[in-house]
Amino acid sequence: MRGYLGVDVGSVSTNIVLIDENENVIETLYIRTQGQPIAAVQRGLEYIRDRIPSGIEIGGIGTTGSGRHLSGIIVGADSVKNEITTHAVAASKLVPGVQTVFEIGGQDSKIIILRNGVVADFAMNTVCAAGTGSFLDQQAARLGIPIEDFGSIALKSKSPVRIAGRCSVFAESDMIHKQQMGHNLADILAGLCEALVRNYLNNVGKGKEILAPVAFQGGVAANVGIKRAFEKALGLEITVPPHFNVMGAVGAAMLARETANKTGRTKFKGFEVAEEKFRAASFECGDCPNLCEVIEISGHGRILARWNDKCGKWSNAEITGVKRNRIENLA
Amino acid sequence: MRLKVGIPRALLYYYYYPMWKGFFTALGAEVIVSSRTTKDILDKGVKQAVDEACLPVKLFFGHVLDLKDRVDCLFIPRIVSVERKAYICPKFLGLPDMVRHNIPHLPPVIDVTVNMCRKEKNLYKAFGEAGKIFTGNPFSIRKAFKYGLEEQERFERLNRVGFLPHESIEKMNKGLVAQNCSPHQHGEMTLALIGHGYNIFDSYISMNLIGKLRDMGVRVVTADNLSGSIIEDRSNELPKRLFWSLGKRMIGSAFHFMRSDGIDGIIHVASFGCGPDSFTGEIIERHMRRRGSAPLLNLTIDEHTGEAGIVTRLEAFIDMIRWRRAAQ
C-alpha cells in the first residue's frame, strides 16, 4: 500500500504526518523547529521512518509552512503549498461541513471561511504577532507555568480579569499590573485567553461571517482556555479536530497524494536525506544597490537551490563554473 | 547648455510624468528621472524624512536625494487638486516644503501650485509660472503646455488600451506614439489590482507584485485601464461624493471591477499608515461582501514587510480562485 508524507515547517514547530491512500492519518509527529528548519526536517524524517508500518511505500511528499521552499528542496517535494490552502484542504476533509476555520500558530494566525466545501474568503494577521501562540508562550514563561498547563488552569477561573490584548507589549505591562493588584493566577490566565480571542476576532476575523461548524486548529488549539474563550465570545460550539496541531501537514500530504496520482510518480528523495549533510549559507549580492541577501542551500558539494534575490538572477541561474567561483569568492 | 530638470520617480510620477516631460522638453530643457527604487534609495529616504510621513512620501525623499546632485533644478509641484471639487492627499501639498526643510543643499525647486479645485484652467497658471524660468516668450510656454497635454493624452490612451502606466511610460520613451491593439497578456485568470500607482507600479515597494502575479498566470488590470468617466460614475454610487481624488479612483474602479464578468478577483493594496487607504479598503470590502461577488484580498505593504508573507497570501488567493472554479 502507498503512504503519503506531509511536512509543515513553521516558525515554532515542524510537523510531519503520514497518511494512507484513503487519507487516513497513520502517523503524526510534532517537534519544535528551534530555528533550525533543515535539522528539524531531518530529525522528523528519521523518526517517522522507524515508525512506518511494514508494507507501506512512500508514494509522494508535500511541504507547507513558512519553510516550505527550503524543506521542499531538501526532501524532493511533489507539492509545495502555502499554509492557508493546506489548512483549508485538511479541515474540509476532516471536519464534515466545516464553514469556518480558526488557525492559530506560533507566529501567525488565520481565519478561513469555507462555503459548500470551497474556500470563500480568508485573512491572516498583519505584521503584528500579538494574537498568536508565541504571545502565550512568552506570558506563560513570565508567569513560570508550563504552557501545557495554561489552559487547564485558566478553566478554573471564576471571573477572568480584563487584559488589554491589542499589543503584546501593552498586554504584558497590563498583566504585571493585575498580578501586583493581587488577582489570582487562574483569573489572569483566563484574562489572557480572552484578550487573545478578542484581538483575533477584531483583527483577523474582522467583518468575516463566522458560521458553525467552526474548526479550531494549530498549536494553540491545545489550549482549552482559548477554546472556551472562543465559545464564550461567539456563542458557538468550537470543534477541535483530531490532529489539530498538524493539520497543515495533513493538508500537505493530501495535496501530495493528488499531485503524485496525477503525475504517476514521486520526486521524494527517500529517507536517506535524513543523514545527508546540507549547508545553508547566505551572501550579499553586490551587483546593484538592492544588496539582496541571497540564501543558498548546498548538499553533496553541489548547490541545490538559491533564493531571496529580487531580480531572479541567482534563483534562476544554472549553476555554472563561473558563477560557482564567484559565490565561493563571496562566501 | 540645456537646463537639467530633475523629476523624482515617485508619487505622482506614475500619473503625470508624460505631461511634465513633454512640457519641459518642449521648452528645451533636459528631463532627468531618478533611478529605479533600490534598498539604498529607500533607506536614505527613510533616514531623511519626517517620521510621521507614510512610506511613499519617505521614498520620495530618497528619490530627491538620488537626483539632487545631478540636476540644475527639481520639479516638485505643490499639487493641491487635479479636478473640480476634489483634493489630493494633504501630504502631497506640503511636499515641496517638507523636502526643502529636511534636505540640505538642494538645487532650486520648481514648486508651482496646481489647484484645479475651483477652476480647471488653473492648471495653465501653474505651468505658465514654471515656464517663465525657461523662456520669456509666452507663446513658447503656451505651446509647450499644449504639447504636455497631448503627451498626457497619448499616455492615458495607451493605458486604456491595456498597458500599465509604467509600461506606457517606457513605450513612450522608446518612441511609441499610439497603439490600438491591447498588449497580449498570458494567463488563466484576470485580477484587478486596486492601489496607489506609486505603490503598485514601483516594483521594489510592491515587492514585484505585478511580476509575481504574472508569473503565477494572472493577467493584471488596474484603474488606469479604465476611462475617467467610468470611475466617476461608479464612485457616485456612494451616498456622498468622495473628495479625495486618489481614493475615488480606487473605489470607483473597484466598484466597476466587482461587477465585471471578466474579473476573477480583486486585490487591494494599502500602504501602512495611509489614512484614506484604511477607509477605501473597508468601503470596498463591505460593498463586495454585500454583493457576494468576486473575492477580495487585502494586502498592506510597509517598509519591513517580509516578502514571504505577501507570497503566501497571493498563492492562497490564487489557489482559492482555482478551487472555486473547479467546484463550479
Image: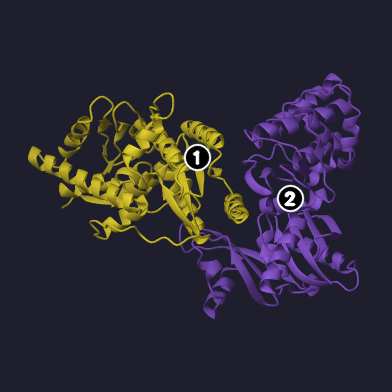
Q: Callout 1: few (<14), some (14-19), or many (20+) C-alpha neighbours within 10 Å?
A: many
Taking A277 as reference, is B44 above or below it?
A: above
The residue that mark 2 highlights is A92
Query: Number of marks in the image?
Result: 2
Q: Is residue A62 left or right of residue B303?
A: right
**Residue occupying the point 28% across, 27% down:** B117
What amino acid is found at the position of numbered circle 2 in the picture?
Ser
Q: Is B5 in front, or is A19? A: A19
Q: Is A10 in front, or is A241? A: A241
What amino acid is found at the position of numbered circle 1 in the picture?
Ser
**Residue occupying the point 42% across, 30% down:** B237
Q: Quadrant of the N terminus of chain A?
A: bottom right
**In the figure, the yellow chain has which letter?**
B
Task: Say yes or no: labels 2 and 1 on the same chain.
Answer: no
Of circles 2 and 1, which is in front? 2
Q: Position of residue B171 (x, y in %)?
A: 30, 58
Q: Position of residue A146 (x, y in %)?
A: 89, 41
Chain A shade: purple
Q: Which mark is residue B271?
A: 1
